[in-house]
């Protein structure tokens, strides 16, 4: 029998953390958040992986909708 893997949407984790911080009296910089979405997603995926949870993505986060710009940035530094 296959082992069940726990999973969680990485984008939801970012939203959950922002909401938790706001509840605790911290004010995340919403303007900066708009320009760091990729970094936020990568950090959430690393955190989930490090605690044994499989990070999942919404289809729009996993599909290449930017004409390979993100791929070129990560692989070639363009």
Image (cartoon, rainbow, N blue to C red):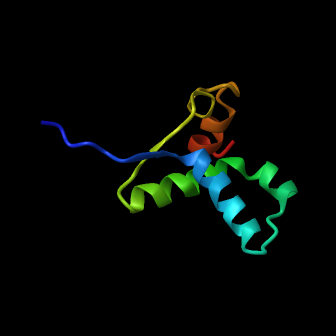
- Residue 4: image quadrant is top left
Q: Nearer the viewer, residue 54 or 64?
A: 54
Residue at 76% x, 66% y: name it: 22
- Residue 32: image quadrant is bottom right
Residue at 64% x, 29% y: name it: 68
Q: Nearer the viewer, residue 20 or 33?
A: 20
Spot occupied by residue 62 in the image (x, y as percentages of width and height): 56, 32
Left or right, 63 with reference to 6: right
Q: Residue furthest front?
A: 23
Left or right, 2 with reference to 9: left
Which quadrant does the C terminus fall into? top right
Which quadrant does the N terminus fall into? top left
Left or right, 1 with reference to 59: left
Q: Residue furthest bottom?
A: 25
Spot occupied by residue 29 in the image (x, y as percentages of width and height): 83, 63
Q: Residue furthest right?
A: 31
Residue at 84% x, 56% y: name it: 30
- Residue 24: image quadrant is bottom right
Q: Nearer the viewer, residue 52 or 73?
A: 52
| Count of numbered labels shown in the rendering | 0
Spot occupied by residue 65 in the image (x, y as percentages of width and height): 67, 25
Left or right, 58 with reference to 28: left
């Amino acid at each position: 029998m296959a082992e069940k893997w726990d999973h969680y949407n990485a984008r939801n984790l970012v939203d959950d953390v922002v909401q938790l911080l706001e509840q605790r009296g911290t004010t995340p910089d919403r303007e900066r958040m708009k320009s760091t979405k990729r970094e936020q997603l990568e950090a959430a995926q690393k955190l989930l992986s490090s605690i044994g949870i499989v990070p999942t993505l919404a289809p729009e986060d996993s599909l290449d909708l930017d004409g390979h710009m993100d791929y070129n940035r990560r692989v070639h530094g363009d």
